[in-house]
Image (cartoon, grey):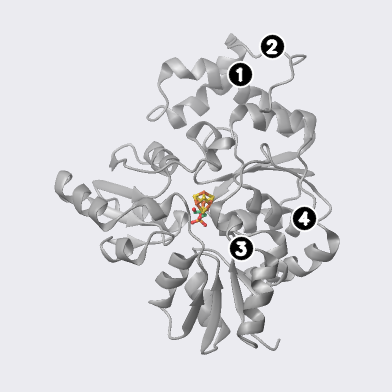
């Protein structure tokens, strides 16, 4: 476990800390009880001081807990938004409030910058589900068929791919290729859900997200019975059966946009738990029903190890340059557009 250096300046809840963080507490008042604030505030205050001193930024995925998402992250969003933010920052240090593949993507787009991941155990079951060798075998089995790889993969897997996608742009990426057949990996459910929306054959892999595969259509029916009128928004990493009974399917950012646009009085986000808290903090007038599943990997990132990473500058992400040069092409093609043969 990463621990805060004991030689640290005082991390107690002083009146100075209280004064300097009170505007941040106002952002999370709805989801963080007042009694807990004295624990978070000194860490938040110190992290924000260190960011300014070191010209560092924190990228915060939508699944970060509210005290990270609303109080220390400089750029927040889904995987696509974080990749875009990473490609634009002029900070010297990037701390990833997210999982390892997101930190690798940030590093690919910023090879000369220091990218830190507060806990190296912040993995992803999708990224674990496939190796570069698996992709080489698939390419041999389906010669000439473009490989679209979800960003939830290692740099080695991205290096074997033609182009990346996220849940926010999967349909657009498939359609943009203009080919009759694609390989889409590793998330079987994302690929099957995308296949329903495109005019193209989609070859899938057997990867699953440990968080989203747990939801069932019976869960959604139960939610509707106990919460009449609830609007159900689901992530496309859920099974096609779950998506079929949801009112909307989209990336984490897509779900937030839906809430902002439609303001459903009662809503459930069928995804990771912290999402609802983060969105509820921004829309206090809406009623969020909160059955959810925790991502054990996302939850490894905490204020204490963000502070430790910023202070010590350890857990730097390194990618073999020979892999990075090829993986970067796949990510940049996603961000900038690409067609086979270009
Ligand atoms: P988004 O790109 O929708 O944020 O999803 C990332 C992720 O890991 C979902 O489980
Ligand atoms: Fe991976 Fe699922 Fe966790 Fe997202 S929620 S990081 S896809 S395990």
- Give the camera-side residue of 154 and 273: 154
Separation (CA) of disc 2 from disc 3: 45 Å
The residue that disc 3 covers is: 130
Q: Residues within 10 Å of mark 1 (few under 14, many from 20)?
A: many
Separation (CA) of disc 2 from disc 4: 34 Å
- Residue 31, given in percent of the width and then of the height, sits at 39, 30
Q: Which comes sooner in the sequence, label 3 or label 4? A: 4
- Give the camera-side residue of 132 and 29: 132
Mark 3 or 1, closer to the camera: 3
Separation (CA) of disc 3 from disc 4: 25 Å
Tag 3–tag 4 contact (CB < 8 Å) = no
Q: Which comes sooner in the sequence, label 3 or label 1? A: 1
Q: Is mark 3 within 8 Å of ligand 2?
A: no
Q: Is residue 232 left or right of residue 202?
A: left
Considering only vertical position in the picture, is 329 above or below 64? below
Separation (CA) of disc 3 from disc 1: 41 Å
- Residue 265, given in percent of the width and then of the height, sits at 23, 46
The residue that disc 2 covers is: 10
The residue that disc 1 covers is: 42
Q: Which comes sooner in the sequence, label 2 or label 1? A: 2
Q: Which comes sooner in the sequence, label 2 or label 4? A: 2
Considering only vertical position in the picture, is 194 above or below 142? above
> Which residue occupies 32% across, 40% down?
290
Tag 2–tag 1 contact (CB < 8 Å) = yes
């Amino acid at each position: 476990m990463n621990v805060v250096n004991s030689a640290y300046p005082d991390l107690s809840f002083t009146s100075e800390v209280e004064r300097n963080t009170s505007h941040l507490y106002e952002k999370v008042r709805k989801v963080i009880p007042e009694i807990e604030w004295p624990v978070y505030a000194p860490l938040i205050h110190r992290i924000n001081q260190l960011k300014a001193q070191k010209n560092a930024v924190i990228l915060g995925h939508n699944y970060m807990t509210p005290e990270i998402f609303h109080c220390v992250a400089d750029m927040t969003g889904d995987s696509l938004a974080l990749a875009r933010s990473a490609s634009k920052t002029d900070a010297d240090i990037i701390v990833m409030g997210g999982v390892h593949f997101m930190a690798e993507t940030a590093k690919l787009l910023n090879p000369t910058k220091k990218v830190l991941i507060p806990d190296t155990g912040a993995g992803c079951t999708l990224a674990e589900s496939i190796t570069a060798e698996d992709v080489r075998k698939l390419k041999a089995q389906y010669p000439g068929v473009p490989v679209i790889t979800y960003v939830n993969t290692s740099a080695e897997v991205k290096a074997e791919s033609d182009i990346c996608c996220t849940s926010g742009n999967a349909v657009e990426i498939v359609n943009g290729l203009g080919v009759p057949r694609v390989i889409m990996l590793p998330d079987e459910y994302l690929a099957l859900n995308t296949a329903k929306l495109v005019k193209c054959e989609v070859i899938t892999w057997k990867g699953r997200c440990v968080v989203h595969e747990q939801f069932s259509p019976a869960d959604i029916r139960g939610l509707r019975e106990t919460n009449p009128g609830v609007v159900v928004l689901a992530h496309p990493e859920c099974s096609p059966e779950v998506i079929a009974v949801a009112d909307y399917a989209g990336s984490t950012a897509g779900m937030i946009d839906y809430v902002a646009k439609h303001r459903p009085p009662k809503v459930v986000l069928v995804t990771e738990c912290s999402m609802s808290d983060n969105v509820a903090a921004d829309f206090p007038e809406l009623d969020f029903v909160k059955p959810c599943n925790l991502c054990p990997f996302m939850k490894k990132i905490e204020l204490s190890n963000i502070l430790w990473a910023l202070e010590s500058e350890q857990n730097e992400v390194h990618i073999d340059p020979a892999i990075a040069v090829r993986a970067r092409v796949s990510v940049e093609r996603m961000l900038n557009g690409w067609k086979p043969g270009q």
